[in-house]
Image (cartoon, rainbow, N blue to C red):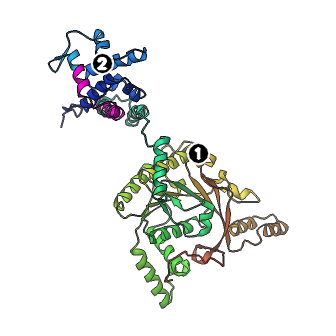
Amino acid sequence: MNAHPGDFNIDLPNNIEAEQQIIGSIFVSNDAFHAVSAFLTSAHFFEPIHREIFDLIAKMIGAGKAATPITIKPFLPADRTIEGMSLMQYMAALMSDTVGAYHAKAHGLAIVEAYERRQLVSIAHEMIDTAFQAGPEQTGVAIAGDFEGRLAELRAESPKEEGPGTAKAVAMRLKERSTKNEKIPSIPLPLEQVREVLGGDLEVGNLYGLLSSSGEGKTSLALQIVHYAAMRGHPVLFLSYDQSPEQCIDQIAGQMTGIEGVRIKRRALTEKEWDRYYNALDLLSELPIVIQKCHREGISQIGNHARRFAKRYARDGGVPLVLLDHVRKVAPRDPKAHEGRIASEINGACKAYAGELECVWLNLNQRNSAGMKRENPRPISSDMFGGEQAKEDYDAILYLYRPDKYKEDQIRIAKDTKDAANIEERFVGWEGKAEIGALKVRFGDPTQRRKLGFEKEFTRYASLREEAPPQLFDEGF
């Protein structure tokens, strides 16, 4: 139990054969050096004599001279031997055994790969030593931060020629995708108007936001999206700080059956309605939907919920959807921090989870009360939790605007009957209607707006287009 975990007896990662091939190919043709000089240095070599030889090669070629065993011999120890050979014999053997310069770059990258693995072993050992020997002034988080910086430096130094983010690598992937007629994996949306505002469906790896005030229907639309996606084979995780799993499923059942939510809650249904309700529950029980009731979780715990969910449904095929309701309820790491920083920390983590888990992530955002002070309460960026700063990590942010709600609120505090009449006039024509719009669309037009119908008794949104009846739910209801 008292053994020091940092005492490892292991062979460090290396690729001596690649080191030999690189040196031999450069001796055969100095052009091979130019294939690797942009990323390979003597420090990457494991064998000390190889480091010395490569360093001399770099200096000779850098000075405009030819690098051969004969030209660098005077700068090497005369009495040094390796594998029973003099250095001159060893370098001549490397020349004769090389496969040529064609694979120089691949061999150079293999050397760097082995070097990076050795660095990881070293960093791991140091981190363990530091953790065991830390003083009272060193917190675990501070220690982790120091080593995260070391890892970031290692990533930054890694050769970028063949990295996944280079223009060459991206262009190759795009060409391959086009040749195969592949589309970016996505999750379909239940209403064409929402799709038009976004400029398409929900794409894998993206972070989306949905903003509205309390009682305006963001959870209602979210549950429609949940059901529509699950019916099409996409596993869904609904992380709810407000509603219980029973409340969520009851609301979806009401949307499916067209039975008023109040009557379902009171269990005041006719015999036929009970049949429809139970049929809806039977259908829902077969869908890949997980509703996680949240309490005081922070974003790290939220991430753990998402990872477990993604692992459970990893083989189901459809792109997973993770829905967080809502951002303001996530426990901040530092409650005293500015809300913009808190929102950025949460949103940045959600964006990272979307990429890591290859899912679509949708955050519900509850508006602040600033909109009530404006004559036109249509949502703007400052209404979000965290304001403009909170927008950075989102690929798109939708808003729901239901004027009926604001008309009722403003009339309630009207100064007099004349003021009330003016309010009525401002909101005329919006009875039973809502607007879906965007505050941000990374690759589209953020000025798009569309009208939707809101069926209050069923807490669901519907299309207003006669020529295209809404396919909110599948046949049978």
Residue 47, given in percent of the width and then of the height, sits at 25, 23
Tell me the SS state at disc 1.
Answer: helix
Q: What secondary structure is the magenta-colored segment mainly?
A: helix
Residue drawn at x 23%, y 15% as measured from the top left: 88
Tell me the SS state at disc 2.
Answer: helix
Residue drawn at x 55%, y 42% as measured from the top left: 337
Residue 83 included in the magenta stretch of the image:
no
Q: Does 10 sit above or below residue 447?
A: above
Q: Kindly indicate the quadrant of the structure image that contains residue 201.
A: bottom right
Q: Is residue 112 visible?
A: no
**Residues in magenta, as a range:** 91-118
In the visual, does 303 lie left or right of 2? right
In the visual, does 131 lie left or right of 433? left
| Mark 2 or mark 1: whose residue is earlier in sequence | 2
Q: Does 7 sit above or below residue 385?
A: above
Q: Amino acid at mark 1?
A: Gly
Q: Is residue 43 visible?
A: yes
* Quadrant in which the N terminus is drawn: top left
Question: Which mark is drawn over residue 340?
Answer: 1
Residue drawn at x 14%, y 18% as measured from the top left: 84
Q: Does 41 sit above or below residue 120?
A: above
Q: Which residue is mark 2?
A: 53
Q: Residue furthest right?
A: 418
Residue 227, given in percent of the width and then of the height, sits at 48, 71
Residue 92 included in the magenta stretch of the image:
yes
Toward the viewer: 136 or 391? 391
Toward the viewer: 228 or 106? 106
Residue 124, given in percent of the width and then of the height, sits at 30, 34
Residue 59, given in percent of the width and then of the height, sits at 39, 16
Q: In the rendered picture of this protein, how many numbered marks are placed on residues?
A: 2
Q: Kindly indicate the quadrant of the structure image that contains residue 155.
A: top left
Q: Amino acid at mark 2?
A: Ile
